[in-house]
Amino acid sequence: MGSGLVLVVLGGFGVILGFAAFANYSEKCYVTPGGFPPCITQYQVALLAPLYPLSMELVLLGLVLTILGTGLTYVGYSKATGTIKGATPREPKKSAVANVSGTPLASAVTYVIE
């Protein structure tokens, strides 16, 4: 379940970063006589400029990771609670109580024997 939640968070971050990189791009076009370039590319945030060519891939990768993480989280939660047919919930570790030197405080301590 923990790995699913990590994938959901990373996927969400990828989607937001990809969309921000896409929205960061702007192009101003002028009608100018002569040999000047008619269009000028501008970016509002310079740090996101290198990510613009990858923005669509970032969004798609983020969506895939988010969907995969959601599925893993569902399977992990269902397996832990036993709501999926055929899946058995995890058994807690067996523990044994050992009485150390007969003192009341030591007899209350539970030691896990694996």
Image: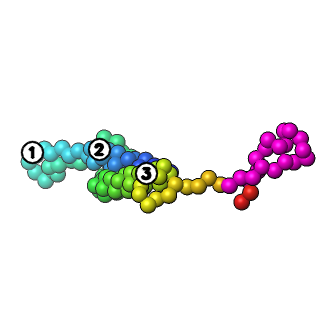
The answer to whether 43 is drawn above or below residue 86 in the figure is above
* Residue 67 percent coordinates (x, y): 35, 53
* Residue 107 percent coordinates (x, y): 83, 43
- Which residue does the image show at 50% across and 58% down from the upper left? 88
- Which residue does the image show at 32% across and 44% down from the upper left? 20
Q: Quadrant of the C terminus?
A: bottom right
Left or right of 101 on screen, residue 68: left
Q: Determine which residue is flagged by label 1.
A: 31
Outermost residue toward the right? 101
The image quarter containing residue 58 is bottom left
Q: Which mark is residue 24?
A: 2
* Residue 98 percent coordinates (x, y): 81, 50
Q: CA distance from mark 3 to mark 2?
A: 45 Å
* Residue 41 percent coordinates (x, y): 24, 48
Name the residue nearer the viewer: 39 or 46. 46
For the record, the magenta segment spans 94-112
Which of discs 3 and 2 lies nearer the camera? The answer is 3
Q: Determine which residue is flagged by label 3.
A: 83
> Is 45 part of what is drawn in magenta?
no
Visible in this render: residue 59?
Answer: yes
